[in-house]
Amino acid sequence: MLATGSPAPDVALEDTDGKTVRLSDYQGRQAVLIYFMRATSCPVCYRHVQDLVRSQNEFAANGVQVLIAVPEDRRTAAAWKAKRQLPFPVLVGRQSTPHEVVGLSKKVFGSMQQSGSILIDSLGVVRHAHSATMPTAGYDKKGIAAAVQAL
């Protein structure tokens, strides 16, 4: 997992239309909050996404683009996004899951996706990083809010 205060790696993911999305695309323009869902079938993670949707105006007012990262393939992610009419880009991995790219896979009797969030400022520095194996602990609403206010 990325550490707060460290430079963000130039991660390349894909949106549900197949377009490459790089974290460096946002550098110099706006901050980025990436919420990593354990799976699109996770009801707890989806409740966290709903909270992000309810807060979308606050994020926009603070210059933060919200991105949702899921471990499934692009077709599954696109269907999930369309069904829920999400206003945020939904991202998948190109060769591995987005979770693996940033160190959110934990080896426990095989591999398990973790949920969590990363806030990267417009200069490309990680300002908030939080993860958990249990989805109920994977969303740090207060920590995200404090990091956004500190931008």
Image: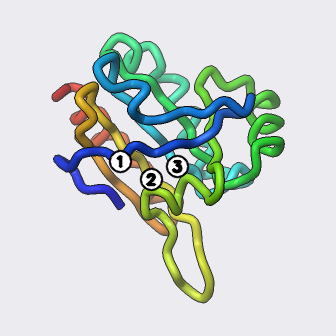
Distance from the alpha carbon under mark 2 to that under mark 1? 17 Å
Quarter holding the C terminus is: top left
Q: Which mark is residue 116?
A: 2
- Answer with left or right where residue 72 lies relative to residue 146: right
Q: Which mark is residue 28?
A: none
Q: Of label 1 and label 3, which has the lower sequence position?
A: 1
Classify 110 as above or below 28: below
The residue indicated by pointer 1 is: 9
Distance from the alpha carbon under mark 1 to that under mark 3? 16 Å
Name the residue rendered at 70%, 49% in the picture: 40
Frontmost residue, 27 versus 83: 27
Number of the front mark, 1 or 3: 1
Secondary element type, mark 3? strand
The residue indicated by pointer 3 is: 36
Distance from the alpha carbon under mark 3 to that under mark 2? 5 Å
**Residue 5 at x, y = what percent?**
17, 47
